[in-house]
Amino acid sequence: MSADKPIYVTQPFLPPLDDFIPYLREIWDAKVLTNGGPFHQRLEAALVEHLGIKHLSLFTNGTLGLLTALQTLQVTGEVITTPYSFAATAHSVMWNNLTPVFADIDPITCNLTPESIEQAITPRTTAIMPVHCYGTPCDVDRIQQIADTHGLKVIYDAAHAFGVRYRGESLLNHGDLSVLSFHATKVYTTLEGGAIVCADAATKKRIDHLKNFGFANEVTVLAAGINGKMNEVQAALGLLQLTHVDRLIARRAQIASLYDEGLRSLDGIRLPFRLPDTQPNHSYYPIFIGSGFPVGRDAVYARLREQSVYARRYFYPLLSDMPMYRDLPSAAPEHLPHAAKAAREVLCLPIYPALPDDDVMRVIELIRSCRAG
């Protein structure tokens, strides 16, 4: 490829337009555009079956899913969460007039550690919101033990975890709720979109009320809900995407293997961690550029950008360094050394199904060339 052709971290897969037209025609003919229409109902059922979960409620985006998950469980006070995540994680806590309490991460998995969670618990703590970072499962057993001991709710930000299986079952079955994102940058997309996964019908019913302004029927409003409903066009695209997603994840695995082979010999670069007994989705390919590499992360980042390769420092800066959070006691840098180190070193490389092998090899060679300074 030419050096001026850009390569981005991700690129959404779009099925052939001719395949989507019949879905659109059906929507136009039915004249049902939203409010839990036929495609919405079909997609919820299809995702429950595909993912191996019990109940799922679709949302117009993942952020509204996080906001509503906290409302569903009537969380109050403080929520322990990670500083190493996308802004929506902590923002959803703040928008619910709750206090995010940041805890440190494991330096290898980049997930919240049980030890840091326990240290962060106060009398005001009512919930934990861990993130399955890059789709790597959190220590779900120990987190649940901590939650049970202290009477806390667990809401997993599972934005990266579509289709991930852990010990033979869906990772989404852990915790009280799991929240998915179907944004255009994700493994599975409805352009924008998201969902809350739960274990029982009564909880799904409450979620469905809350995402529709709190309406239980035409004249009964049960709670101060929000408009989080997914429309029919998004749901139709989701149904079509679902017929491709396994193939798309398999292609991501091939790209990840190329990166593994091309980069594993480089001193000072740590490759993505893969937890045993896990079926990953390869949602991201993060490398960590440490002091053993001849140049720092930002120099590699700049070198790639010079050649139109737009890798991403994902997650940098930390949430705890953002102006709205940095004055919180839990945001103090001395409390979060592993998260700070990961944020300094991380670089997510391009990975998406349409990325040609030649482009992958070019990215590898650009990184290897940085050893010359």
Image (spheres, rainbow, N blue to C red):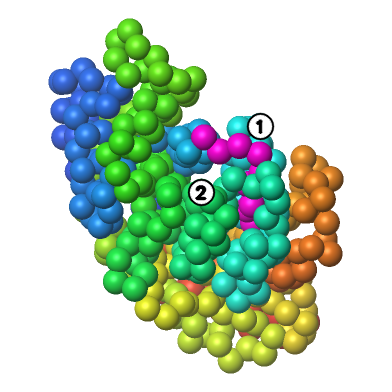
Residue depicted at x 64% and y 61%:
117
Percent of width and height locating residue 75 = 56, 38
Residue depicted at x 57% and y 72%:
109
- Which of discs 2 and 1 lies nearer the camera? The answer is 2
- Work out whether 179 lies above or below 253: above
Query: Can residue 280 be seen in the rendering of this structure?
Result: yes
Is residue 78 rendered magenta in the image? yes
Query: In front: 123, or 144?
Result: 123
Q: Earlier in the sequence, mark 2 or mark 1?
A: 1
Identify the residue position indicated by label 1 in the image.
97
Calculate the distance from the C-alpha at mark 2 to the C-alpha at mark 1: 17 Å
Is residue 362 rendered magenta in the image? no
Identify the residue position indicated by label 2 in the image.
153
What's the residue type where badge 2 is placed? Lys
Q: Quadrant of residue 249?
A: bottom left
**What is the tally of numbered marks visible in this picture?**
2
- Work out whether 70 lies above or below 304: above
Q: Residues within 10 Å of mark 2 (few under 14, many from 20)?
A: many
Percent of width and height locating residue 43 = 24, 41
What's the residue type where badge 1 is placed? Asn
Magenta residues, start to end:
74-82
* Lateral position of residue 56 relative to residue 135, left or right: left
- Work out whether 318 lies above or below 299: above
Percent of width and height locating residue 177 = 42, 48
Do the numbered discs 2 and 1 sit on residues whose CB atoms are within 8 Å?
no
Residue 180 badge: none
The quadrant in which the C terminus is found is bottom right
Please, what secondary structure does the residue beneath circle 1 have? loop
Residue depicted at x 76% and y 64%:
336
Query: In front: 3, or 209?
Result: 209
Residue depicted at x 21% and y 43%:
45
